[in-house]
Amino acid sequence: MQTTIKGLRFWCYTLAGSASLALLPMTNTLAADDTRVNGYVENATYGREGVGLSKFRNTLQMEMEKSAGSVGFFNNVRFNATLRGSYDGVYDLNDDEYGRNAGGPVQLQDVGSGYVPHGGGIAPTPFLGFDTTRNPNEGMVVLGEHLHGQDNGVAFGVPVRPCDEDDRGCIDGYLDKDTNELRFQEFNDRADFVRELYADFDINFDNGNILSTRLGKQQVIWGRTDLFRVLDVINPVDYSRNNIYDELEDIRIPMWILRTDYRMGPTEVFDGLAFDDLNFQVVWNFDKFRPHDIGQCGQPNVILDAGCFFRGMNNLWENGGTVANFAGATPDGGLATDFGPGQIGIREAHMPSWSLANTQLGMKLEGVYGDLGFSLNALTYRSQLPSLRGGIPAQNGFTGQTGVWPSLIAFDIHFPRVNLVGGSVDYYSQGIDTVFRVETAYTSGEEFANTLRDKLYSESDVLRYVIGADKNIAIPFLNEDNSFLFSGQIFGEHILDHEREQRTYGEAGIPNYEHNWTATLLVQGFYMNGRLTPKIITAHDFRAQATAIAPSVDWLVNDNFKLTLGGNFKVGDGAREFDDCRSCNPWDPFTQTPGVINHLPGESAGLSGYEPLGRFQSGPIGMAQKEDEIQLTARYSF
């Protein structure tokens, strides 16, 4: 099979730029003895199969640190600032896919006609339809079209152009980026170009204990694992940069936080029980709430494709639109149906305003006992993932009456309060020269989609954990001088109040798996005195049967210049089907499903499709099956 990569000439530009970086003077920039200034410039160019250029990000990052010594009764006073700015040229160089020219007209499946254009469906009542001059058939894609066909399921058009070019579906205050906010991601109303800005200071007590405080914009890292977060949930994450695959240090979103540690050092707690180190930490995130950046539809990385679902649903609420295979739906399809504004979709996102009640507070006790390190953690915070809550007033598409209808696919977005308790342990076994890691968290207050409930969501406690191990293993026939690092972990998630039932046409309830596991493995080698480091990272979602494979090679050309060539490939199953609520019968008797006996109002018959809930069965790896990439990064550090 021949694969065409559009935008190949930009690879040449990148190689030329990389060569230019290598010719820069190889010097470090240092100020006075008590001040350190360094940073880097970087170009990251990614090419995606079938799409072409998916990233052309150019980054400048500056890191500054100044030590002020003792100031009054404070000791070891230090100031740190990290500034980062980037320009992603993909929105200019490949604007047919991601910029102002993205998208086009769409065709939607109809059991009677085969396919009809957006605006060509039937309307339950003609005068309650939508105006195609307000919501025209242009600048759109069909929801999920890069992953699957419409296959007799739910589908509708989703606008994909930046919000200054096309504001349809742009949710105010949540997913509403304009072209410049996409190009220059750090330059926004939250001043993300200030990556970190904090002061450290200590108070030394006569008993030898230390009160150590960090105040300012920062990352607070809890937990001992990577890729999938269990305890490390204080800072939200920017998944729009590279899905789940970037280092967390680069994609955590710094927040304004007060972190205080009371360091007790070697401490005897009870007679005969003495710790080699003991520390108590309090974390107060007093910044205005901020969710994960899941990616806005029209960006190259939209985790779970959720941002596209949200944008399409908000467009349906604001402007109306055509939904494929909706009216009279059975497993063999249905009629494409035109809905008017305010009937179905997402109405708004309730973004928590700043208040003391909306701040986040955490406590951690950690220590060392021989070869064992441990932590006990507790945190109250806002969910950084959105929850869709039904039960909002909407217009009946048949009668025109406004009311709250059971199981109607009309939602507001909320971010519920979550409480977490957990802990972690790491242990170094000298006998086998291996580090073992265990991390666990129990949360209450999380919300999940649930088609068995009238409001189409329910709350559940969740147990998550990670078990991992790191070991250096010699493989002489590959490298006689250095061992290879093997790091493996398995991540488990258990939804404790899971609900699912078999109905006439399929299962209904919570689409997420009740029990699921994802395993990761890192293998890294070292050559040329550590200047050449090949590695491969794999991640496998057991229930979704989806695997990501990310090989790469880092070449440290000299002390300043590094090249990284890598890839990211997926294998396994992609999109999966689950109850799509076409058979939820909100407007009884008009929406009763053919073939269902005694179909009660608000009761799902389990009719399934890929959209919208199948994404929770596919997971972030399965939903990225069509995003294979070749990646080249050049970095010059100074």
Image: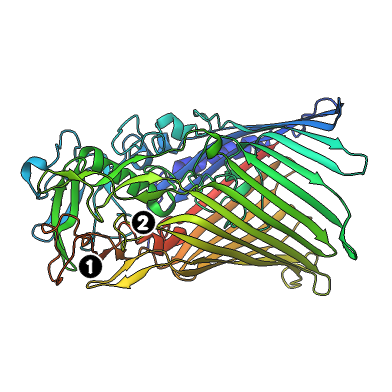
Residue that numbered label 2 is attached to: 457
Quarter location, residue 536:
bottom right
Q: Which mark is residue 22?
A: none
Question: Residue 594, image x and y in percent?
Answer: 12, 67
Quarter location, residue 428:
bottom right
Q: How many circles with numbers are drawn on the protein? A: 2
Q: Nearer the viewer, residue 43 or 222?
A: 222
Disc 1 residue crowd, few under 14, some 14–19, many 20+, Cα 10 Å:
many
| Residue located at (70% from left, 51% from top) | 364
Q: Quadrant of the C terminus?
A: top right
- In the image, residue 448 above or below residue 632: below
Quarter location, residue 283:
top right
User: In the image as oriented, which residue stretches furthest toward the left?
Assistant: 126
Q: Using residue 49 as the reference point, say whether residue 383 is left or right of it.
A: right
Residue that numbered label 1 is attached to: 605
Circle 1 SS class? loop
Question: Residue 576, image x and y in percent?
Answer: 35, 65
Q: Using residue 251 as the reference point, say whether residue 180 is left or right of it.
A: left
Question: Residue 611, image x and y in percent?
Answer: 30, 58
Q: Amino acid at mark 1?
A: Ala
Disc 2 residue crowd, few under 14, some 14–19, many 20+, Cα 10 Å:
many
Q: CA distance from mark 1 to mark 2?
A: 17 Å
Question: Residue 575, image x and y in percent?
Answer: 36, 63
Q: Amino acid at mark 2?
A: Tyr
Residue 86 visible somewhere in the drawing: yes
- In the image, residue 304 above or below residue 42: below
| Residue located at (20% from left, 56% from top) | 586
Q: Using residue 611 as the reference point, say whether residue 270 is left or right of it.
A: right
Q: Are marks 1 and 2 in contact (CB under 8 Å)?
A: no
User: In the image as oriented, which residue stretches furthest toward the front?
Assistant: 271
Q: Nearer the viewer, residue 158 or 394?
A: 394
Mark found first going from the N terminus, 1 or 2: 2
